[in-house]
């Protein structure tokens, strides 16, 4: 899923305070799992903004709202009217939801309340970790199910580098060395011999480098 | 053994001599005087001089330009290239540029992560990894082609090296990793600084067992300690560095003003012991900002005078 983190409150406030009305708008799927952007968080953020507005004696109408997903037209039906009469929207979705609103409502200013941080999992309660960079050409089949593109700080396809120490990355003792994990997995699977196969030079044109990506289902 | 390039290092190694390389870091300046002076301090005692490529991710005068300066001084540079800062277009372009100046050696490296350097907010590239850079440079040289498939009118003709760190983890793939670099096309290997001689010997035993020493020239890295503080720093803070406690204890056991001398002696003793190991083809002496000590180390280790090859 997509993981996001709320921006510092001061940064959010600076973006929106010029408006007379703000709809604080939650997205209740991915970013609600990490308790940063769901409808509940929209409600809390709206009250914080109301308090700030009152402290600064600014007359701003701050309402909260939300839908299941800000990245799909279908879910906007019930809030369409509300958004159309809003003066601005503070979206708690990932960057996709923010842009979806910008495209859907060409005259409506929309601001991001979150920094979209990564594609990750829920490792433990309250712990989210990056696992994928959507490189467009998945290598997990040859790396024992561990992704060096997203989990090695140098995205080395034939690792580990010389900085791997006690299973940790050279940049931080809090980061697992992805290639230690790959080697351990290959060994557990009885496939350590495969370590010596050189992973070929990658086609990054399927990644961000190739420009914005899309795909179309035929027959829809 | 067939000599494939104009590299002096290749000739020395293939003629069966123990090679000696060293290393100089370019200055953080547009004035190359510093590295030229450093190179002159060591030139009569080494066969070639590695020029580091923005080591520890600190921005410096570029390795290629520094190599050209050394070449103009009549010296034999080894162009270090990291894959951190350049994509395959830039790397191949720099290889051609280096070859056009008669730079005959290159060393393919990943590069330290940018978070260690002076621009931690920089983007990193890593379009290729170090093994793929070895493949690329061999492909350009041997097939006369760019990665994109186009022909190179006059291919670069360089002797290709790689690094190995026998002390990084996991230890069990350290020999397979060397095998991978050889399979990619590495012709010489310069290792991480060797202080843990037993562990290095264990690694070399496994290297020899697989016959890898017959496929690549292995040059252990030697860095003299200037002080006990340096030894402690390297033990604690340099990733992938193995400094055993007895090295620290030995330096601690002498007066502060004698620690540098003791560091040199430790380095000389290490060379003498490593020379005996089957498969060791030479030494890469990295005296960090202490280049003036390289001649002494080389002389005391019995590696002087350097052989003359044409």
Image (cartoon, coloured by chain):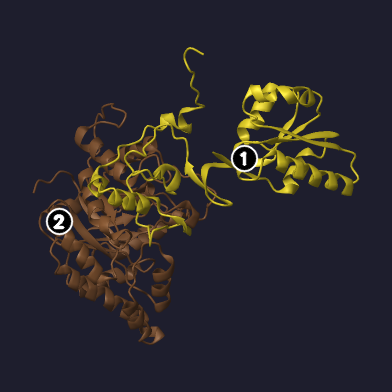
Chain B's colour is brown
Along the horizontal axis of the image, is B220 left or right of A147? left
Report whether residue B72 is seen.
no
Which quadrant would the N terminus of chain A be assigned to in this image?
Answer: top right
Question: Is there one chain holding both mark 2 and mark 1?
Answer: no
In the picture of the structure, the residue carrying the numbered disc 1 is A31
Instruction: Say which residue appears at 35% left-offset and 65% top-offset.
Output: B241
Q: Position of residue B42 (x, y in %)?
A: 29, 64
In the picture of the structure, the residue carrying the numbered disc 2 is B213
Density class for disc 1 (Cα within 10 Å; few <14, some 14-19, many ≥20) is: many
Chain A's colour is yellow
Q: Where is residue A13 in the image (x, y as percent from the top left)?
A: 77, 44
Q: Which mark is residue B248?
A: none
Which label sits in the foreground, 2 or 1?
A: 1
Decide which of A31, B41 is in the foreground and name it: A31
Q: Position of residue A215 (x, y in %)?
A: 48, 21
Decide which of B25, B284 is in the foreground and name it: B284
In whole angstroms, how far apart are the C-alphas of marks 2 and 1? 54 Å
Label 2: chain? B
Label 1: element kind? helix
Along the horizontal axis of the image, is A188 left or right of A76? left
Instruction: Say which residue appears at 27% left-offset and 44% top-offset.
Output: B134
Along the horizontal axis of the image, is B267 left or right of A133? left
Label 2: element kind? helix
Density class for disc 2 (Cα within 10 Å; few <14, some 14-19, many ≥20) is: some
Q: Where is residue A100 in the image (x, y as percent from the top left)?
A: 64, 26
Report whether residue A26 is seen.
yes
Decide which of B291, B109 is in the foreground and name it: B109
A37 over B165 or under it: above or below: above
């Amino acid at each position: 899923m997509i993981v996001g983190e709320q921006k510092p409150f001061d940064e959010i406030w600076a973006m929106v305070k010029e408006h007379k009305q703000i709809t604080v708008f939650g997205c209740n799927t991915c970013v609600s799992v990490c308790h940063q952007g769901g409808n509940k968080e929209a409600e809390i953020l709206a009250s914080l903004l109301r308090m700030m507005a009152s402290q600064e004696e600014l007359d701003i109408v701050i309402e909260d709202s939300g839908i299941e997903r800000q990245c799909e037209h279908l879910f906007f039906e019930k809030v369409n009217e509300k958004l159309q009469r809003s003066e601005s929207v503070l979206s708690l979705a990932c960057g996709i939801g923010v842009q979806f609103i910008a495209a859907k409502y060409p005259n409506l200013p929309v601001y991001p309340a979150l920094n979209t941080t990564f594609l990750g999992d829920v490792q433990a309660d309250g712990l989210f970790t990056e696992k994928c960079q959507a490189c467009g050409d998945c290598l997990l089949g040859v790396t024992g199910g561990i992704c060096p593109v997203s989990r090695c700080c140098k995205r080395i396809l034939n690792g580990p580098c010389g900085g791997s120490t006690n299973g940790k990355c050279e940049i931080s003792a809090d980061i697992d060395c992805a290639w230690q994990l790959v080697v351990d997995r290959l060994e557990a699977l009885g496939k350590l011999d495969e370590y010596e196969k050189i992973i070929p030079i990658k086609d990054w044109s399927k990644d961000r480098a190739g420009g914005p990506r899309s795909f179309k289902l035929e027959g829809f | 053994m067939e000599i494939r390039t104009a590299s002096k290092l290749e000739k020395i190694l293939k003629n069966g001599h123990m090679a000696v390389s060293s290393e100089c870091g370019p200055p953080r300046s547009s004035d190359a005087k510093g590295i030229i002076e450093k190179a002159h301090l060591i030139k009569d005692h080494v066969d070639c001089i590695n020029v580091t490529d923005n080591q520890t991710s600190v921005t410096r005068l570029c390795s290629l330009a520094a190599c050209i300066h050394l070449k103009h001084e009549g010296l034999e540079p080894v162009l270090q290239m990291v894959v951190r800062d350049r994509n395959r277009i830039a790397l191949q372009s720099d290889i051609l540029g280096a070859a056009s100046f008669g730079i005959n050696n290159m060393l393919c490296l990943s590069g330290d992560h940018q978070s260690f350097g002076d621009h931690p907010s920089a983007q990193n590239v890593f379009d290729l990894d170090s093994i793929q850079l070895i493949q690329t440079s061999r492909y350009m040289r041997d097939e006369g082609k760019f990665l994109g498939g186009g022909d190179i009118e006059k291919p670069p003709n360089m002797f290709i090296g790689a690094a190995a760190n026998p002390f990084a983890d996991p230890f069990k793939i350290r020999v397979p990793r060397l095998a991978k670099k050889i399979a990619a096309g590495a012709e010489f290997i310069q290792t991480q600084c060797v202080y843990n001689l037993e562990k290095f010997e264990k690694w070399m035993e496994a290297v020899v067992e697989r016959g890898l020493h017959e496929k690549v020239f292995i040059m252990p890295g030697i860095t003299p300690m200037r002080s006990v503080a340096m030894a402690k720093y390297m033990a604690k803070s340099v990733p992938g560095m193995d400094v055993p406690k007895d090295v620290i204890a030995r330096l601690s056991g002498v007066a502060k003003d004698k620690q540098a001398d003791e560091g040199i002696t430790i380095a000389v003793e290490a060379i003498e012991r490593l020379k005996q190991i089957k498969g060791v083809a030479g030494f890469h002496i990295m005296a960090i900002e202490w280049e003036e000590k390289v001649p002494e180390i080389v002389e005391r280790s019995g590696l002087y005078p350097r052989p003359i090859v044409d």
